[in-house]
């Protein structure tokens, strides 16, 4: 049974690696972006208890899984069930380059154009990773990584991992 959490900055390659592991090891796959936000404008985080309920449904339905996201508060909810974490500690400039070339994410945006219209805001947010002091920050991710008691790996580049 393999239960993996992948986390890091936006554009670090979390989704790409998670999907590779999902295919290679037949893991259930959960992108935390799909449950972290309420469907409102402007964006608003879903209550933590609601996100936890959805995570619990997923983990109960899948013996082996990979969960990916940048939300340390949500990662902490499932950390006790994980036997492995992967910290995508990728340079901010590479994250920005990855964000510029990412394929359309239909589960997040109604069109590629809508996704591209959000790119400037996303790049600005990625640039703040090292300075922020929230659940999306480098500081929060590093604390999560350091406190995890089981197998942990830190990647500093996007070379093939699987």
Image (cartoon, helix red, strand yellow):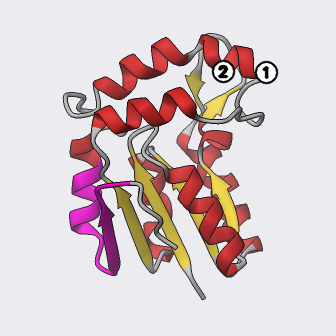
Looking at the image, residue 152 lies above or below residue 157: below
Q: Looking at the image, which residue is at 42% across and 21% down?
A: 123
Magenta stretch encompasses residue 143: yes
**Mark 2 highlights which residue?**
115
Q: Looking at the image, which residue is at 30% across and 24% down?
A: 127
Find residue 4 and report its horizontal and vertical position in percent. 51, 71
Depth check: give the residue in front, 51 or 155. Answer: 155
Residue 25 left/right relative to 94: right
Mark 2 near mark 1, Cβ–Cβ under 8 Å?
yes
Find residue 81 and report its horizontal and vertical position in percent. 50, 75
Circle 2 SS class: helix
Label for residue 111?
1
Find residue 21 and report its horizontal and vertical position in percent. 60, 70
In which quarter of the view is residue 114 placed? top right
Residue interval drawn in magenta: 141-157
In which quarter of the view is residue 56 placed? bottom right
- Where's the N terminus, which quadrant? bottom right
The answer to whether residue 27 is seen in the rendering is no
Circle 1 SS class: loop
Q: CA distance from mark 2 to mark 1?
A: 6 Å
């Amino acid at each position: 049974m393999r239960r993996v959490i992948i986390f890091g900055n936006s554009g670090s390659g979390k989704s790409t690696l998670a999907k590779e592991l999902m295919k290679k090891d037949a893991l259930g796959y959960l992108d935390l972006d799909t449950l972290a936000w309420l469907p409102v404008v402007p964006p608003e985080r879903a209550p933590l208890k609601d996100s936890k309920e959805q995570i619990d449904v997923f983990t109960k339905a899948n013996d082996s899984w990979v969960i990916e996201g940048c939300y340390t508060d949500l990662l902490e909810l499932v950390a006790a069930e994980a036997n492995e974490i992967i910290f995508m500690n990728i340079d901010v400039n590479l994250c920005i380059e990855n964000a510029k070339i990412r394929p359309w994410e239909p589960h997040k945006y109604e069109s590629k154009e809508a996704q591209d219209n959000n790119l400037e805001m996303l790049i600005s947010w990625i640039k703040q990773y090292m300075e922020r002091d929230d659940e999306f920050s480098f500081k929060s991710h590093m604390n999560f990584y350091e406190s995890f008691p089981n197998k942990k790996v830190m990647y500093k580049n996007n070379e093939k991992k699987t």
